[in-house]
């Protein structure tokens, strides 16, 4: 009913719709219309009501909202099936179980907050209200090796989104942390659902620290939020929709085999290229210059006159005076 009312208001494109015509069209009482409109206002919809003329929709909410997000979507597949929850333990875990029940390519699960969000190696991911915590199910036409590169695509899509929407230069810190002035603003977790060869399902989890103050996160984290940087709340539906659009574009480009383009875009956002770094592999520290990544996502280190490659699972990367992960 709520969405039907919104559809009617949207259809009038900012013009008034009388309470009577809403109640006639939807076959509900005027009082029920009024109640629904109150609910929408509480959810952040800016709806003007005038006694004689009726209602008109002025603005959709900036908080996460299924209808508003659907309006902002410009994708073919990503987010066309969208499930929004007030709270979940973890959107990745939820989507994983949907994937096992054969959910379709592009299904997106979003939660307003998570109570058991996680990062790589089951590290805890703090997910208070006001962030964008979402997971996307992809069944790409790619080999397993190429599909693994979609985490790189996700980083690029996110960095592009920050740039497009807020003019922010958010960097990608290898392998795939999004950082602003050395502080983490978003994280990415790619997981395979079930047996890869059997179902070919990849789950991409993305967490963006958006509309909440830094005090909501543990003080020891080297983190920041969009609210801190931009100085005001951003529209989370627009943020999610733009990101999904950019990710779909990246996915298509990878499916068409443009790996070089991906590496180029990734490198253009990468933090610390051609700078001295320290790499810790199982307790052994390698110092050298960070030269970029290989096509398989491995980091290239110029170390004592030769090039060494490191994969993300086995090392931690640190740059002096810069953000360092765990
Ligand atoms: C990541 O892991 O950065 C991937 C985070 C992915 C989260 C999304 S939210 C939606 C979906 N559902 C999930 O359950 N997960 C995904 P990693 O690189 O392992 O970094 C984890 C580390 O980041 C933690 O150990 C903390 O040090 C730090 N951290 C935790 N919460 C943070 C936050 N909100 N902002 C910045 N850093 C945080």
Image: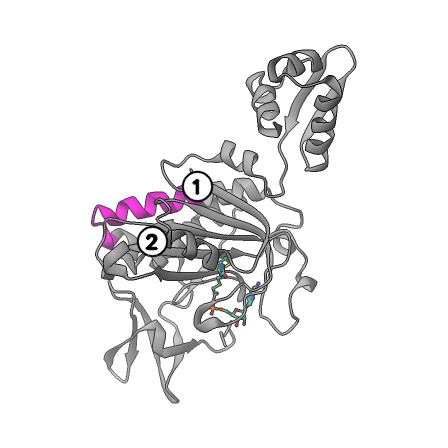
Colouring mode (rainbow / by chain / secondary structure / one colour)? one colour
Q: Verify whether residue 79 appears in magenta.
A: no
Residue 206 to residue 51: above or below? below
Main SS of the magenta part reads helix
Percent across and percent down for residue 312 are 35, 72
The residue that disc 1 covers is: 79
Q: Is residue 164 left or right of residue 61?
A: left
Name the residue located 65 percent from the left edge and 24 percent from the top edge.
57
**Image position of 298 with respect to 9: above or below:** below
- Report the front residue among 248 and 129: 129
CB at disc 1 and ligand 1 closer than 8 Å: no
Nearest to the observer: residue 182 or residue 89: 89
- Quarter residue 129 falls in: bottom right
Does mark 2 have its CB less than 8 Å from ligand 1? no
Q: CA distance from mark 1 to mark 2?
A: 24 Å
Circle 2: element type:
helix
Residue 96 percent across, percent down from the top left: 41, 57
């Amino acid at each position: 009913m709520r969405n039907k009312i919104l559809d009617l208001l949207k259809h009038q494109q900012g013009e008034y719709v009388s309470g009577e015509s809403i109640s006639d069209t939807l076959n509900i009482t005027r009082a029920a219309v009024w109640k629904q409109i109150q609910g929408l206002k509480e959810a952040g919809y800016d709806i003007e009501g005038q006694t004689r003329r009726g209602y008109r929709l002025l603005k959709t909410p900036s908080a996460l909202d299924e209808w508003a997000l659907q309006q902002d979507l410009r994708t073919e597949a990503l987010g066309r099936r969208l499930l929004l929850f007030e709270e979940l333990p973890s959107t990745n875990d939820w989507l994983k179980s949907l994937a096992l029940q054969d959910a379709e390519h592009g299904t997106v699960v979003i939660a307003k907050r998570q109570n058991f969000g996680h990062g790589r190696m089951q590290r805890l991911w703090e997910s208070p209200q006001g962030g964008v915590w979402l997971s996307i199910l992809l069944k790409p036409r790619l080999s397993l090796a190429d599909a693994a590169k979609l985490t790189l695509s996700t980083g690029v899509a996110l960095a592009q989104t920050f740039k497009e929407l807020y003019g922010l230069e958010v960097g990608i810190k290898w392998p795939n942390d999004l950082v602003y002035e050395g502080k983490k603003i978003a994280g990415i977790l790619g997981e395979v659902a079930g047996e890869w060869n059997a179902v070919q399902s990849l789950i991409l989890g993305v967490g963006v620290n958006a509309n909440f103050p830094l005090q909501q996160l543990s003080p020891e984290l080297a983190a920041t939020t969009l609210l801190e940087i931009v100085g005001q709340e951003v529209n989370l539906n627009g943020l999610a929709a733009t990101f999904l659009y950019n990710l779909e574009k990246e996915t298509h480009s990878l499916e068409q085999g443009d790996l070089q383009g991906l590496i180029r875009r990734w490198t253009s956002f990468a933090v610390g290229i051609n700078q001295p770094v320290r790499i810790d592999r199982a307790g052994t520290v390698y110092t050298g210059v960070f030269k970029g990544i290989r096509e398989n996502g491995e980091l290239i280190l110029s170390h004592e006159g030769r090039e060494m490659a490191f994969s993300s699972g086995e090392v931690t990367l640190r740059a002096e005076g810069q953000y360092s992960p765990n």
